[in-house]
Image (cartoon, rainbow, N blue to C red):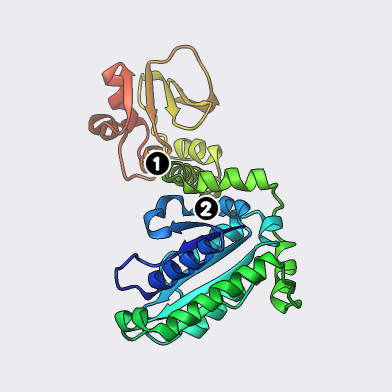
Amino acid sequence: MKINIYYGGRGMIDDPAIAVINRITEVLEELRVTVERYNLHEMKSSIMSLPKTIKEADAIILASTVEWFGIGGYIPTFLDACWLYGDKSKIAGTYMFPVVMAKAYGEKEAHLDLITAWEILGGKACNGICAYVADETEFELNTEYRDIIEKRAEEMYRTVSQKFSALPTSNKAIKQNIVSDIINLTPQETEQLSKYAANDNYVKKQKEDIEQLAGMFKSMLEEEEKGGDDHYLAALKAHYVPQENFSATYLIKIEGKEKSLIIEIHNKELECYFGQIEQADVIGKLSINVLDDIVEGRMTFQRAFMQGSMTAKGNLRIIRMFDENFVF
């Protein structure tokens, strides 16, 4: 038999939950049970991958301390990981015994919360140990309390070894309804996904990618609201001020667009479109935001070039003439 203990407290010396699980461990090991303990406060970055360790266990103990209100520490994170990445078929056959000590009000409520959570996950929740501890030293030295803890540990052993059954609960019915809306993944897929979730660098990169995509789609939507490419063509035509004896071709590459903005001026005649040409008098490159600033009058073509917001190569006189031909 193997029983895993998941301790979710902060690891403080005076945490009464530590004293209880230490005594439970001694009793179970005397009964030749293999006990493996996971101190979640020492495994913060890998909690999301811990549900896979349940596969090796016949039962688990969730240990926590109520320091001021509710289940504190890292147990909620571990339960979240079980919900998202745990092998539900394995959890369904796994007994769970809660151990909740309280230095404040609420040990019974927290004990019940752990039972409820495990039942919703589909597991077999059993009564564990919960108590209010005003003085940790007095609690640990009290022989009556020690006997109670030992008897509960023996009951845990008998429950698992004899495979006790439990009556159905509404919590499991709720679980069936909720799970129907969740994507079904194989145990191997959920285990792999948990490894990704526990990898801080991977999660950070995913967030950056999502932000980049969100920014890109936001720009696309804003551009579409303005009228898309036609918006820029219409703005250029509306603000065109013909100059005497001037002809030039501008090719403006816009970041994120496959086609360039082509502006052809031939003796007061203007033609502008999106496309590709091989030669131009001026070749510029800018972002869609800088182009917006130019056509909306917040920035001139030459100022964008001088400030480095836009790169350009070609005849400097023709670069300067852009702002005379187009007055926004």
Q: Relative to the observer, which residue lies in front, 82 or 204? A: 82
Q: Sort mark 2 into few (<14), some (14-19) or many (20+) by Cα contacts within 10 Å.
A: many
Name the secondary structure under disc 1: helix
The circle on residue 289 is 1
Figure quadrant of residue 156? bottom right
Q: Nearer the viewer, mark 1 or mark 2?
A: 2
Name the secondary structure under disc 2: helix
Q: Sort mark 1 into few (<14), some (14-19) or many (20+) by Cα contacts within 10 Å.
A: few
Horizontally, residue 40 falls left or right of residue 3, namely left
- Tell me the quadrant of the picture where the N terminus can be found: bottom right
In the image, residue 120 above or below residue 213:
below
- Looking at the rendered structure, the kind of residue marked 1 is Asn
Mark closer to the chain start, 1 or 2? 2
List the residue tagged with mark 2. 50
- Looking at the rendered structure, the kind of residue marked 2 is Leu
| Residue at 62 percent of width and 48 percent of height | 190
Horizontally, residue 210 falls left or right of residue 42, namely right
Q: Tell me residue 86's x, y (percent).
A: 61, 55
Tell how many labels: 2
Q: Tell me residue 5's x, y (percent).
A: 50, 62
Horizontally, residue 324 falls left or right of residue 29, namely left
| Residue at 52 percent of width and 50 percent of height | 49
Q: Tell me residue 165's x, y (percent).
A: 74, 72
